[in-house]
């Protein structure tokens, strides 16, 4: 009996179509499947009229003469659109533009797979920087020198918090005036100290959630300090103050802040300020000030106990620990000088904190060390300045949050060593130069010019990445794992906070101060006596640490050979920059030969390019406010050297 087929319960009759329709159907199905799988043919795939004519004339001549290159991983799959370009995702450079794309897929070996673009590197999505505010209300009659000196102190504050992953913002009375309770507060007739305190809150309440910090409260701890990590999470379930810091740092969410302001303004004690003058004075003199204690009484604020990660240079501690400065600060004639000295002191403490955070010291990585000495000069320059003792008015002093620190001792500076590969250790800081494969190949094989013949016969592929990752990953793992580990070392916050990756071809590195959060020393004493006083006798400068010891088992090249390397490095820079077609072809060939080294180079330069752009944008947005480079009497982007002018 024939099988009865049904569709949705109704019997249906299958009828085999006639043979010619079967053929037609098969053809249609074939076309549909082909289009579905491979997409419509793009114009590149279709031979042009000229191609066809040429092919008919010379049937044996291959139509496009392609350079013979080793087999490369090819992009297979359907043609897709490039993802749209994200705003602010490019920056200029002497060597073609730097382009990036922020995406969660950054851990794949090749950016190209995501961006469909040879030049654009995939970076991890930008981490949101939690807002940290400070309130600054300049007294109306203040001389320019003091104003600029205060601005420089605020700049120190901004740099330090920026380096710790925050977005510092300076508020003023303008924000406070926008708060709905401003007029009411004006009518309360508070004294100036209390008024300043409530103005901070009004400005903060107007902005909404975040951290409110005094501009003399700075982060001085490792990146992974629990308090800093907590603040970075940007979730503040309780409106809180930090007991040990008085009113130096507060954090909370918008509704809680505004509720606190209302409860303060409505407090019965403020109904008649004249009558309650004495009671208010008692609260006002308590550590933390009147507002916090009134809120605490009404249970509208919590006290956070442990916060060893933040140093607060309030006047009490300055008087107690840094007496010389207190004298200057309290005398109107020397106030500006005192402020600059305080900024220098804070800078030295930030630098000291960095040095203490890495007890294993500082490593400059030098893979393939035989011929790459010139490549490490920039990294060593940065590393020596990082290990130098910072210029300071009080060489034996410690930051307020770690009064029992070990002050920097120029006789025993932070350890600085060369290493032939990257060490994954949380107590070691790494500075490395990432060369373009053309630069590396040219230096490593001591060749002024490269060509295809040489590449194929002699050049090892992706040698740099292999050597760099040798001690963490060994020699057995595949290239893909190596590049992914490299990207993680550059970009994961924990390891990004303990490594700096410079591109070898880039000549200036002007935003290092914002990477570290303090100004690197720009001057050193020439004699070897530690702590030579600078010109006016108030600052101590220290000698520059020596060059690191050469690597063991590696011949130290003669000066003449190093000079050759320097020349070669310059030639490589020119080659990569070159617009000449022939040179471009060779550079391209070197990149294709070293796909993973090229990817590492692209990734590292995009990483620092994005960091630069983000910082510049922020500086532009803040330039009208106190604490910007412009308001501090510095040229924008002009770097760090104002401390040296003292
Ligand atoms: C960033 O992008 C915005 C909008 O596309 C543009 O107005 C601004 O000029 C860009 N900033 C920088 C520094 O490129
Ligand atoms: C505030 O208290 C003082 C002294 O007790 C009194 O003289 C004054 O009238 C009061 N002011 C108001 C507005 O209640
Ligand atoms: C303030 O400093 C100036 C200059 O150093 C000095 O002449 C003056 O006596 C100081 N004033 C006080 C009150 O210490
Ligand atoms: C470094 O070590 C940590 C912990 O052992 C590991 O999670 C991380 O992936 C390593 N990083 C690199 C770049 O190998
Ligand atoms: C390091 O210090 C020297 C002077 O000792 C200075 O010439 C150089 O520019 C500094 N380098 C950096 C990167 O700060």
Image (spheres, rainbow, N blue to C red):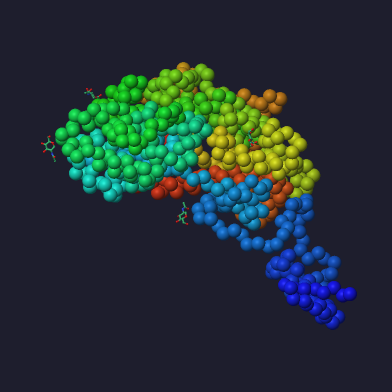
Residue 151 x %, y %: 34, 38
Left or right: 381 with respect to 592?
left
Question: Does residue 70 show up?
Answer: yes
**Viewer-proximal residue, 438 or 386?**
386
Residue at (80, 78) in percent of width and height:
13
Residue at (44, 32) in percent of width and height:
219
Question: Does residue 500 show up?
Answer: no
Residue 171 x %, y %: 33, 43
**Relative to 462, residue 82 above or below:** below
Left or right: 129 with respect to 601?
left
**Relative to 138, residue 533 above or below:** above
**Residue 630, quarter of picture:** top left
**Residue 79, quarter of picture:** bottom right
Rendered-image quarter of ligand 4: top right
**Viewer-proximal residue, 235 or 612?**
235
Image quadrant holding the C terminus, namely top left
Residue 452 x %, y %: 75, 49
Residue at (28, 34) in percent of width and height:
294
Left or right: 32 with respect to 639?
right
**Viewer-proximal residue, 377 or 639?**
639
Residue at (25, 39) in percent of width and height:
267
């Amino acid at each position: 009996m024939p099988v009865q087929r049904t569709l949705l319960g109704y019997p249906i009759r299958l009828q085999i179509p006639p043979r010619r329709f079967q053929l037609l159907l098969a053809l249609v199905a074939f076309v549909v499947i082909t289009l579905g799988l491979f997409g419509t043919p793009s114009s590149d795939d279709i031979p042009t009229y000229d191609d066809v004519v040429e092919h008919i004339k010379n049937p044996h001549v291959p139509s496009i003469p392609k350079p013979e290159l080793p087999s490369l991983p090819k992009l297979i799959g359907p043609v897709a659109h490039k993802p749209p370009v994200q705003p602010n995702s490019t920056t200029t450079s002497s060597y073609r533009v730097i382009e990036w794309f922020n995406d969660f897929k950054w851990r794949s070996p090749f950016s190209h797979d995501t961006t469909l673009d040879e030049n654009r590197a995939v970076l991890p999505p930008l981490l949101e920087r939690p807002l940290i505010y400070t309130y600054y209300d300049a007294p109306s009659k203040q001389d320019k020198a003091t104003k600029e000196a205060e601005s420089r102190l605020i700049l120190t504050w901004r740099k330090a918090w920026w380096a710790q992953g925050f977005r510092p913002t300076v508020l003023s009375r303008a924000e406070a005036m926008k708060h709905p309770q401003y007029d009411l507060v004006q009518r309360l007739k508070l004294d100036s100290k209390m008024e300043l305190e409530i103005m901070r809150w009004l400005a903060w309440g107007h902005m909404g959630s975040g951290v409110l910090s005094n501009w003399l409260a700075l982060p001085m701890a490792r990146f992974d300090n629990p308090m800093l990590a907590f603040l970075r999470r940007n979730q503040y379930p309780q409106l809180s103050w930090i007991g040990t810091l008085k009113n130096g740092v507060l954090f909370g969410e918008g509704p809680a802040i505004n509720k606190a302001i209302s409860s303060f303004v409505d407090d019965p004690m403020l109904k008649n300020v004249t009558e309650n003058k004495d009671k208010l004075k008692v609260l006002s003199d308590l550590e933390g000030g009147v507002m916090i204690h009134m809120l605490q009484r009404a249970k509208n604020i919590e006290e956070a106990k442990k916060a060893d990660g933040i140093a607060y240079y309030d006047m009490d501690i300055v008087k107690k620990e840094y007496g010389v400065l207190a004298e200057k600060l309290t005398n109107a004639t020397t106030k500006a000088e005192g402020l600059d000295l305080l900024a220098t002191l804070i800078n030295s403490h930030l630098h000291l904190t960095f040095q203490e955070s890495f007890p294993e010291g500082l490593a400059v990585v030098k893979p393939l060390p035989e011929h790459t000495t010139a490549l490490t000069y920039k990294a060593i320059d940065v590393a020596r300045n990082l290990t130098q003792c910072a210029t300071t008015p009080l060489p034996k002093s410690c930051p307020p949050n770690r009064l029992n620190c070990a002050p920097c001792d120029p006789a025993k500076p932070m350890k600085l060593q060369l290493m032939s590969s990257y060490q994954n250790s949380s107590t070691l800081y790494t500075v490395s130069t990432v060369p373009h494969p053309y630069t590396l190949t040219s230096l490593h094989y001591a060749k002024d010019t490269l060509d295809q013949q040489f590449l194929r016969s002699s050049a090892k592929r992706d040698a740099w990445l292999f050597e760099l990752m040798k001690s963490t990953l060994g020699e057995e793992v595949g290239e893909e794992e190596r590049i992914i580990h490299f990207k993680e070392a550059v970009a994961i916050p924990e390891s990004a906070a303990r490594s700096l990756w410079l591109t070898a071809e880039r000549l200036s590195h002007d935003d290092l101060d914002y990477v570290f959060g303090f100004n690197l020393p720009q001057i050193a004493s020439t004699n070897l006596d530690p702590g030579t006083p600078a010109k006016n006798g108030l600052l101590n400068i220290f000698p520059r640490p020596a060059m690191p010891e050469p690597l063991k088992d590696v011949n130290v090249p003669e000066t003449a050979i190093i000079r050759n390397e320097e020349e070669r490095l310059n030639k490589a820079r020119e080659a990569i920059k070159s617009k000449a077609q022939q040179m471009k072809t060779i550079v391209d060939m070197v990149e294709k030969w070293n796909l993973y080294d090229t990817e590492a180079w692209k990734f590292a330069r995009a990483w620092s390019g994005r960091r630069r752009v983000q910082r510049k944008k922020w500086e532009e947005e803040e330039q009208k406010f106190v604490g910007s480079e412009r308001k501090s009497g510095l040229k924008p982007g002009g770097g760090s050297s104002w401390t040296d002018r003292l």
